[in-house]
Amino acid sequence: MTLLYIAIALLLLLFLGVPVAFSLAGLGAALLAIKGLPMAMVAQNLQGALSNFVLLSVPLFLLMSNLLLKGGVGRDLFEAVQKWVGHWPGGLGVAALLSCGLFSAISGSSVATAATVGTVAIPEMTRRGYGKGFTLGLLAAGGTLGILIPPSIPLIVYGVITEESIGKLFLAGVGPGLLLILLFGIYTVIHSIFFGKHSSVTKASWPERRKATLRAVPTVGLAFLILGGIYSGAFTPTEASAVGAAAAFLLTKFFLKTLTLKAFYEAVRQTVLTTIVLFLIVIGAKIFGKAITIYQVPSMISDMVDLHFASPEGFILVVTGILLLLGLFLESLSMLLIMVPVLFPTVASMGIDPIWFGIFFVILIEVALITPPVGLNLFVIQAIAKTPLGVIAKGVFPFIILMMFSVVLIYIFPAIVLWLPFAF
């Protein structure tokens, strides 16, 4: 019954509109007080929550993505990719997807990816006659690649919680990220052939392709600098975030000359605001996690799973259902910080690979980013397109089905996730 009471109390706080960070911290503190434990434990956990050096990479990766967003690099990426594939059936949609994939490799943020590419791609696709629901659904779903393709902020946080190698988690995200781009791309082409009423794009000439590609090369080079540096051992993920932030500033300010002083200030301001929100959630989750550990909630859940779902397949199925349900009410990082400490002991006891589970978890919280009523990517695309949320939600539904299909594929073929991190 203890588990049920804690779950009801947390859901009640969330439904009452109490911010996630304060719901977690307040309930955690209350649980500790009920046990008669000193409130000094709250202060200790508050301080200890942010003591991990790896978490320093979160604000730096956010700063990098905001600098690139304000510097307008999405326009260069989209223009370059469009020159190569724009004349294909559904070519602008494919170009938007590939642009999302490229920007994901230098951002780590789903919202930044959706905003950067969406700002450029939505007007162009709409002007060419692409259906509004399809266009907005495509960009909302494409933005989710920002938290799967490395560097990924949720994978960094997962690595901190579980003490797994962040480098291996980054490598594990590559295969599923490419798989999702492929599935989304196939759907885009098929939809264009059978249902598209848009005008075709003239095939670009070689000089046009060369000019657009050269403009985008420095941005793509930034992705290779970060990922190549991490995987070669030249620097750690935390150091890579600092290198990336500095390189993003130099690229947009001095090379592309698109970053104004006002835009720089806004990028820093947005980074600070987002970092504060994320770290408050981390602190709240740390306090809540300490409390539920004392109450032996993880072991209760593990015993319950062993009793009713003895196989890994049953456990994965139940976790999928829970995360899909929570995704209707919680944003992605909150889901990760609440559920991973609770579920991870069972993951280890069932022999499920923790690297694979991290990618599985992130794909499911990607779904949370595009499911109403709290899907952040839906609101980002709505703000850009000035369109009712229902239109976007309808357009994104086929992509949710494709994401769930990708979960089935990585379960049947775990090598999609595990081959790359364990090949080196």
Image (cartoon, helix red, strand yellow):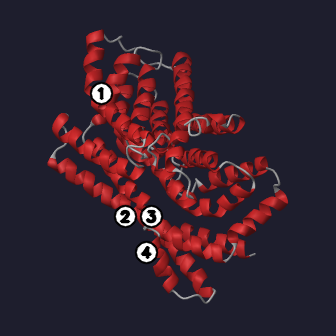
Q: Amino acid at mark 2?
A: Ile
Quadrant of the snapshot with the C terminus: top right
Q: Which residue is mark 1?
A: 217
Q: Amino acid at mark 3?
A: Asn
Residue nearest the observer in this picture, 67 or 387: 67
Q: Is residue 32 visible?
A: yes
Residue at mark 1 to residue at mark 3: CA–CA distance = 34 Å
Pinpoint residue 151: horizontal percent, then vertical percent: 44, 44
Residue drawn at (52%, 40%) of the image: 171
Between disc 1 and disc 2, the foreground one is 1
Residue drawn at (36%, 51%) of the image: 239
| Tag shown at residue 47 | 4
Horizontal side of residue 325 vs 95, given as left or right: right
Q: Which residue is mark 2?
A: 276
Residue nearest the observer in this picture, 264 or 372: 264
Pinpoint residue 258: horizontal percent, then vertical percent: 19, 38
Residue at mark 3 to residue at mark 4: CA–CA distance = 10 Å
Along the polypeptide, which appears first: circle 1 or circle 4? 4
| Element type where label 1 sits in the image | helix
Horizontal side of residue 229 vs 17, given as left or right: left
| Element type where label 4 sits in the image | helix
Residue at mark 1 to residue at mark 4: CA–CA distance = 42 Å
Q: Quadrant of residue 325?
A: bottom right
Along the polypeptide, which appears first: circle 3 or circle 4? 4
Vertical relation: 372 (above or below) 210? below
C-beta proximity under 8 Å, tags 1 and 2: no
Q: Which residue is mark 3?
A: 52
